[in-house]
Image (spheres, helix red, strand yellow):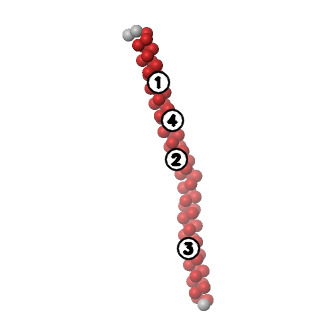
Amino acid sequence: MSFREYNNDRTDNEFNQMRIKNNVMNTLNLYRFIGNLFEMYLPQLFNVIVEMSKGSEEEAKKRQDEDSSS
């Protein structure tokens, strides 16, 4: 094996290692981003659902009170 071949192989290996590292880092960043979205918005989603269901009960009670007073 000549020096040129060795140098080309080494350069190719370094390029492949950098490419793999970048792919792994991009994947990790995507998972981190999705995790942050869930962490930020998932509790709010539950709060919205609870508030929506409470609103329906309150309106139903008001209607019952109005119907019984009439």
Residue indicated by mark 2: 34
Question: Disc 3 to disc 2, how far (Cα)?
Answer: 32 Å
Please tell me in which quadrant of the rendered image residue 1 appears. top left
Amino acid type, mark 3: Ser
Contact flag, marks 3 and 1 (Cβ < 8 Å): no
Q: Which residue sits at x=46%, y=30%?
A: 20
Residue indicated by mark 1: 15
Q: Which residue sits at x=58%, y=72%?
A: 55
Contact flag, marks 3 and 4 (Cβ < 8 Å): no
- Looking at the image, tell me whether mark 1 or mark 4 is earlier in sequence order: 1
Task: Pick the residue in front: 24 or 8.
Answer: 8
Image location (x, y in percent) of residue 37: 55, 50
Question: Disc 2 to disc 1, how far (Cα)?
Answer: 29 Å
Question: Disc 3 to disc 4, how far (Cα)?
Answer: 46 Å
Image location (x, y in percent) of residue 59: 58, 77
Specify the quadrant that holds the C terminus: bottom right
Secondary element at image label 4: helix
Depicted 58 relative to depicted 69: above or below: above
- Looking at the image, tell me whether mark 3 or mark 4 is earlier in sequence order: 4
Residue indicated by mark 3: 56
- Looking at the image, tell me whether mark 3 or mark 1 is earlier in sequence order: 1
Please tell me in which quadrant of the rendered image residue 43 appears. bottom right
- Looking at the image, tell me whether mark 3 or mark 2 is earlier in sequence order: 2
Residue indicated by mark 4: 25
Question: Disc 1 to disc 4, how far (Cα)?
Answer: 15 Å
Contact flag, marks 1 and 4 (Cβ < 8 Å): no
Q: Residues within 10 Å of mark 3 (few under 14, many from 20)?
A: few
Q: Which residue sits at x=43%, y=16%?
A: 8
Amino acid type, mark 1: Phe
